[in-house]
Amino acid sequence: MCGIVGIVGTTPVNQALYDALTVLQHRGQDAAGIVTIADGNFKQRKANGLVKDVFETRHMQRLKGNMGIGHVRYPTAGSSSAAEAQPFYVNSPFGITLAHNGNLTNAKDLRDQQTRLARRHINTTSDSEVLLNVFAHELERAVDMPLRADDVFAAVSRVHRQVRGAYAVVALIIGHGMVAFRDPHGIRQLVLGRRTNDDGSIEYMVASESVALDVIGFELMRDVAPGEAIYISEQGQLFSLQCADNPKLAPCIFEYVYFARPDSCIDKVSVYAARVHMGRKLGEKIKREWQDLDIDVVIPIPETSCDIALEIAQCLGKPYRQGFVKNRYIGRTFIMPGQKQRKKSVRSKLNAISSEFKGKKVLLVDDSIVRGTTSGQIIDMAREAGAEKVYFASAAPEIRFPNVYGIDMPTSNELIAYGRDVAEICTLIRADGLIFQDLDDLQAAVREENPELTLFETSVFNGHYVTGDVDQGYLEYLNVLRSDDAKAVREWSEGVADLELYNGES
């Protein structure tokens, strides 16, 4: 999972890109990068680390220009090597740099195709570099110079016909402008905004979430439609065209559950409002199925579940309390690379307020249960703080299947719900009771904000992959490629032989 941003402005964009990435930091804490265009050349800085650590004053001074793109990442399909920090760059045709949020499901075939037929070299294991080369190869077919908007759209159309999976993309083409496009299923989100300056000039911006627009002072125009491409020339002219043959909007529902910020609006849905609806529906289920349970207090596991827990408490007529204090400087544990690191980080991330637990029957509320590591540790902490009984409620249904579209839940055997019923999961996380949101209720909660949403990407819950190209063979391939053990071996080998081609200047 990643966060992307792109700006075509009339004034320097380096600070605006930096500010946008800090707002999107929740989408990627592994690496960050910015590329701008100045004097007909790309200016780049990217490295592993948080945004505040990657970009120092000297780097910002180097990132000149009125047009640029930025990226924050978690490693999913590739490794966490600094060489895979984005944006990526190719020098032909024209000079293109690209940032990508999502995962391609046919990356292996595309890589082989680019090597064998297009004769293009791909230097990393990242599917984003594969996508860049596919796009670059299709742009080479353009006959006009300079490029026209129609040439860009034709290239994106051909990309859509070849590439499968999830992708929201922003790219810069030297001497021409900025391109942004979204996969034909709209799995990964992308929004378009604009800002009118005092002199009447207009600046355009695309980003993964609307909150990035808000913070910088851009107005949300609309969501980029599934399959749509946006082209903004260096002169600030905006062109758009539907480039997919059969687009269907199926946004990833996990964005609303957990990943997106509550102050964002995605596909005309307020993330905050959707979570409130989730809480109400889960509260009604608890009230219906747990009538016999004597719950004293409802406590959220901060902080994505706070709004949900408050609604549950109101529905049950029980007190709502903050029983855990969160250390905001610890990364999201379910995406951390390795079980040992995840276990260690849970205790660092949260600290219990003993007075809120002692002698009480507690209902803990979380947004989801993935590997179960965090949930089990938190239940233990509640008991250590003096809780008499600990019940657990998940705002999402059981996560039983890998996410292949950009959130790092790659392998079935690492998911606690895979092949297990609710009672078995309850025993494993050491809870006195466990309840999950129903999938129909989850979809209805999001749809309350936008009734036009008829389809969601819900594969982690039901195994239905909307791109139609994911079978057991592919999942087994991912299991080998993306397990914790596989990543550890790959990162060791890359650390031994790091070519450091990713950063020309430190």
Image (spheres, helix red, strand yellow):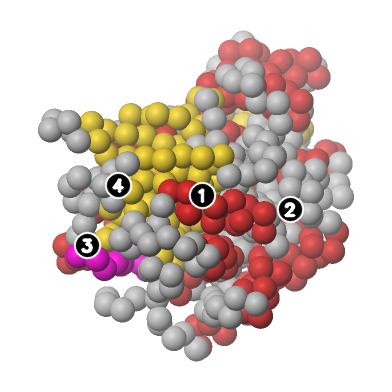
**Residue at x 78% of width, y 54% of height:** 469
> For residue 402, which numbered disc appears in the image?
2
- Quadrant occupied by the C terminus: bottom left
Viewer-side residue, 182 vs 283: 182
Which residue is disc 1 drawn over? 153
**Residue at x 24% of width, y 66% of height:** 40
Is any part of residue 463 visible from this angle? yes
Viewer-side residue, 384 vs 162: 162
Label whose residue precedes the other's in the sequence (3 or 2): 3
Task: Name the image quarter holding residue 481.
Answer: bottom right
Q: Is residue 48 magenta?
A: yes
Viewer-side residue, 478 vs 245: 245
Near mark 4 (Cα within 10 A), the count class, few <14, some 14-19 or many ≥20, is many
Q: Is residue 241 left or right of residue 48?
A: right
Question: Which mark's residue is nearer the viewer, 1 or 4?
Answer: 1
Near mark 1 (Cα within 10 A), the count class, few <14, some 14-19 or many ≥20, is many
Label whose residue precedes the other's in the sequence (1 or 3): 3
